[in-house]
Image: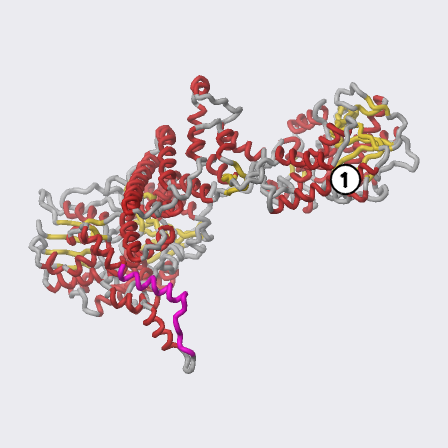
Amino acid sequence: MDDVWVILPTRRAVSVFLEYLANESETPFLAPHTLAVDDFITRAAGVQLIDSVSLIFELYDVFRVIDPQVEFEQFIGWASVLLADFERIDQYLINTSHLFEYLTAAKAIERWNLELPSGAKPLTQTPGTSRYFRLFENLQTAYHALHTRLNDQGLAYRGMAYRLLAENVETLIRDNTAYEKVYFVGFNALSRAEEHMIRVLVDAQKAELFWDVDTYYMDNTAQEAGDFLRKYRDNGWFFTKADRERQENNLAGTPKNIRVVGVANASMQAKVAGKIYKEWEAARGAGRGAWGADESPSAPGSTPQALKTAIVLADESLLVPVLYALDESVTDLNVTMGLSLRSSLLFTLIDTLFEMQRTVHEFRDRDGQERRIPKFHHRHVVKVLNHPFIKQYERIRELMTPEETASNGETRPPEPLFQWISKTIVKEQRVYLTEKEIRALGNDDPLIRVLFSRWPNEEPLRAIQALYDLIELLRDVYRTSQDAIEIEYLYLFFSLLKQLETTLDTVQQTNRNGGEGSPPVTVRSFRQFLYELIRQTSIPFTSEGNSRLQVMGMLETRALDFERVIILSVNEGILPQSRRLNSLIPFDISLEMGLPTYREQEAVMAYHFYRLLQRAEEVVLLHTTSPDAYGNSKGEPSRFIRQIEYELVPKARGLIRLSRPTVRFGPAGSEQIADVSELHVPKTDGILTDLRKLLTDPKRGIYPSYVNQFVSCSMRFYFSRIVGISEEDDIEEKMGAIDFGNWLHKVLERLDKEYRLKGKPVSEPLIIQLLDEEFSSTMKGRVVESGMNLLLYDLAKRLMLDFQRQQSSLVGLEVIGSEQTLDTFLAVPIDTGETLSVRIAGKIDRIERFGDQIRIIDYKTGKVDLPSRTPENLAEKLLNDGQSDKMRQVWLYKYLALKNISLYGGLPRDNNRQVIYPAVGMPVEAGFYSFRDLKGGFRSNPVTFGRDETAAEYIAESENLLRTMVQKMISQAVSFQKTDNLETCKYCDYKKICGR
């Protein structure tokens, strides 16, 4: 069989065929030449396939001759689409002169004018249509020039190789004695180049075809799976009497168990597939079902017994989830598909770096100079620092000994470096950071220098060098993790960079020699180039071909049969793919010229799908029920599932059992642990112990904010004060209400402490200076030069200046305290018979004297609602009304002031009570300065317990209410519960926990 050739659709089919052939003989013999069709074409045509990078640069050189003004960045955007069109044009032997003439302006206007209604004005060219058609006029020149350049080098792209062989098939194969007989096995939709080659060889009796067809789609003219095969049969092409006799009725004529399973998302499909295969293996081990207990290994003269189960991925990005979902006991498997480099963690890191470089913002220098400073956005910085590879690098770095760390000149932060940087960025609200600032935060760590260096757009080689440096630094990560797949990814990526670097160097050298100025490739176009290469690059798996389990893509299943099949992503838009075809050739012209469209693509995929099911006994079709994140699937089951249900099953007359099992995750019969709608927390002994510590701690106790939390929602008080759950910090690029208020509070505090308390004058320039200083200090990364922040900055300046003018008009106003903490201890009997000494405290923004009155002040930048007089149900309002928080706050402030005056003869002016401001007998009021209503001036506390109450009466009544409140807090009979007022939940940090 030296000169016999067997041509199959895939390399996997080649290896399986040779295995079956070997089992037909007990003695060794020379096998025929067995090749996948693409390998056969290039070998017979006598050309070498050009790599994709070099092909794009060859095409670019062609276009630069045609149009010297063509820009590389624009070219790279449509180059791959044009090359795909050239591929189709060649595979289908299209007359290029006719095609490109058909695309020219004259022909287009001629066609359009024919469609105009009678009497309409004829169409004429415009500048826009002229530019449009000029591209097509250049295409024919580019097509022929590209062929000439590649022919001169003995190179070809895939479609070009098919055309070369088809046009010279007589001399290269038919009349070549090296090709005694050629068998084409397992094909379906032949391109016109393949049809021509095979017709010539069949007519010369040098070729035969072996089809794999089924009665279901050959006799059903509405079934798209048989479109091509019916055409060949009806036209008398290649179909012989023997072919018709070999036609089988496997789909509708043999028993099958088909399960259709819908799950919520793509990753769940992998888990279900792994579970089903595990069950099949268990059944095989028990000798049940189609596997049989007497299965024996392959022996000479018998057929191999290994190709039994296939897990087929219509969406090949699910390969890694499927591999992880397989049971640990599954060690004997073969992966007949590449693992895409685009699916790797390495690619996500590279993609994040490019995105960060693309979104670098430039800001004018703060001193007014024209110099522009590039800054990285905080979200990209934090995303890079949180990448798994960077985290692994950080762990390795932390394992360094203190001596090694010191030798590097670093000062270790109190936690892992990158984690500390991320927290610092959020804590200091640094929205934008320069290279210098990030390096300072990172102690000039070498990885920080590589990750956050700027890549000038005109210097792609700088980007390549940075990626080399990154790979060098991450080698320890790969070595430590010992992840074979990721190590292979690293090698592939390094190889791609080397290939691109060599090509870019050649281009730059050519430009220098030709005197054409700077290189045409930028970082932006380099990224497009690199991503196209990454898309085409995958890791080929190496494993035993006769493994019991095969994991493969749909195209790899061609010409192969399996007893059990699991197909994932059987969704419309994935299987078959959505109707989109990227092409520069309009759809109507593709039809006119005989080029394939999405209709042919769907017919091809339908054939692969049904052919895979022909000899299968167990079939599982998995699909998602919700849209995926990438827009590939809308959550709709594939039309193929509907066809099986409504066409195939009725034809099978009971031989096919179709079921739709449901998937449940978790142990069978498991009950819901908790109903969040009834969420409450009983006060256990442990919780009561924590609560007592809080209430009696000399440095903690309860503040007005604690009391307000407890009254408005006791569950919120529990999460915040007992458990200590805090919302994850985030950066707000726009100044929020809380940030705005904190900023003004900082300025007011400095004015009171540093100036008014010391009797120093306060001027408007001073206020503006402090506003600038505190903004820079508390909101380092926020941009104030434009947008909402600029408006809020102007508002703050106006409010502060108005407040200063109002204060200046109050004669006799004296500030006697700022940010002063007032506290006292209250004896509270509880139901256990004990008496707790509970600390009641409050931090006062400002204490002032106006005339003979002491005023306890709280600054408010938000809305202040206070009743004009004491409510009739005062106790109910203070103890149970969550909407009375402002009134409750000033009530407690007044109580604390009166209590301190009664205990110490005045108000302490420091936290150690070393200095007391005498205030015995002076009236005390508590209230607000509201920056929402500065004209309203001081808003005082409406709480009174009697018409002519004394200070002692106010203290006594307040303490009675406070005791009631503390007793309710500490009572074991009262659980912590969610509030019924949903308005309270709108801005609560814990609403997700409560299901609100």
Extreme residue in the front direction: 515
Q: In this view, does 347 lie above or below 90?
A: above
Residue at 31 percent across and 64 percent down: it is 137
Who is closer to the viewer here, 459 or 611?
A: 459
Q: Is residue 658 above or below residue 395?
A: below
Q: Image check: 358 left or right of 735?
A: left
- Here the colouring is secondary structure
Q: In this view, does 512 lie above or below 235?
A: above
Q: Where residue 365 appears, x then y in whole percent?
A: 55, 39
Q: Where residue 661 appears, x then y in whole percent?
A: 42, 51
Q: Where residue 954 appears, x then y in whole percent?
A: 86, 32
Residue at 46 percent across and 46 percent down: it is 664
**Is residue 139 shown in magenta?**
yes
Q: In which quarter of the image is the C terminus?
A: top right
Q: Main secondary structure of the magenta part?
A: helix
Looking at the rendered structure, the kind of residue marked 1 is: Phe
Q: Image check: 872 left or right of 15?
A: right
Task: Judge whether residue 171 can be spotted in this image.
Answer: yes
Extreme residue in the top direction: 403
Chain part drawn in magenta: 121-141
Who is closer to the viewer here, 381 or 627?
A: 381
Question: SS class of the residue under badge 1?
Answer: helix
Q: On the image, which quarter does residue 643 sit in?
A: bottom left
Instruction: Classify mark 1: residues with Cα within 10 Å, few (<14), some (14-19) or many (20+).
Output: some
What residue is pinned by disc 1? 803
Q: Where residue 99 appears, x then y in whole percent?
A: 28, 66
Q: Image check: 202 left or right of 982?
A: left
Q: On the image, which quarter does residue 719 sit in?
A: top right
**Is residue 848 shown in magenta?**
no
Extreme residue in the right direction: 948
Task: Judge whether residue 503 can be spotted in this image.
Answer: no
